[in-house]
Image (cartoon, rainbow, N blue to C red):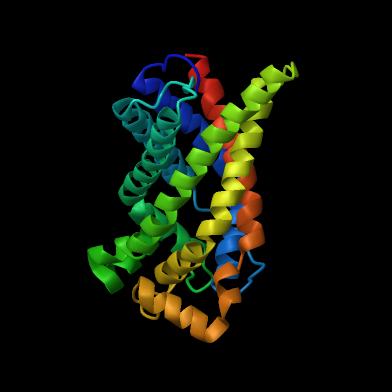
Amino acid sequence: MAGQYPSPLAHLQAGALSGVSTVILFQPLDLLKTRVQQKIINPGTLGTLNLKKRNVPGTSIFFYILYLTRRTLGSLDSQVSENPQSKLHTTLSNIFSGAFSRAAAGFVLMPATVLKVRYESSYYNFTGILPALKSIYATRGIRGFFDGAVSTAIRDAPYAGIYFAIYESTKRFGRSVSLHYNLHLPEPVITATSGMIGGITASYITQPFDVVKTRMQIKPDVYHNVMQSFKKIYREEGIYGFFRGISLRILRKGIQASISFSLYEWATAKN
């Protein structure tokens, strides 16, 4: 994200490109993760829900809000001063920007997220989007479209904040090493590596909240709120219960983060 940023529209377009690409590549892994976290592995159909309706606008909104937040906080410049206060300001700005952007985008797309998780789960046998929408509304009302919203925010905000801060710091470090040792590392290599490191690290840290979020959205009548869900999972499954699907999530998030930000940076650089 070096240099001057292009127009806000370019960030929406770049986010859309990133969203389309990653959802096509990683939807099967996301489905498997959901099945594993619900404690039932069903090898049936991998689902036909067109998730571009959720992921594309979600990614676009995230990158757009991220751009606006970073511009407001003054952390867009890639050249960070060696002054410790400047580095601290930039790091804190990146953490807040990532966390706020993901939480805001997640709230806007929460109804689609609930629909996605219910559709992927083998607890339900929805035949289409409209029947799923009717079922959720009939059983839970409008509130049903926001089941797991708190746990999602608790998971996504820290994930995005941790991820983005690590991503930017690792990217600066990679550029510095490349320049210092005259390695001439291609920018896509630095970006992709930084994205993977940030994605894997943040995924491990926030994994328990991902499990809680999935359970609350699949069976809100059993998993009522965040604290009750944490206690229930720990009591019945122990620590292991919070790390169901961790390998699938690490694999998906690591590669997805690498590709997502690489495509985003490439697309914005072209504008």
Is 199 left, or right, of 95 in this rendering? right
Position of residue 35 relative to residue 88, above or below, is: below
Q: Is residue 38 visible?
A: yes
Depth check: 35 or 172 in front? Answer: 172
Position of residue 118 relative to residue 14, above or below, is: below
Depth check: 231 or 89 in front? Answer: 89
Residue depicted at x 41% and y 55%: 113
Residue depicted at x 52% and y 21%: 267
Residue depicted at x 67% and y 67%: 43
Q: Position of residue 215 (x, y in %)?
A: 46, 71
Depth check: 219 or 8 in front? Answer: 8
Depth check: 56 or 125 in front? Answer: 56
Q: Position of residue 149 (x, y in %)?
A: 34, 60
Position of residue 22 relative to residue 229, above or below, is: above
Q: Position of residue 152 (x, y in %)?
A: 40, 58
Outermost residue on the left side: it is 142
Q: Which of the 4 image quarters holds residue 100?
A: top left
Q: Position of residue 122 (x, y in %)?
A: 54, 71
Is 79 left, or right, of 173 in this rendering? left
Q: How many marks?
A: 0
Residue depicted at x 74% and y 20%: 181
Outermost residue on the bottom side: it is 236
Q: Is residue 47 visible?
A: no
Is 182 left, or right, of 79 in this rendering? right
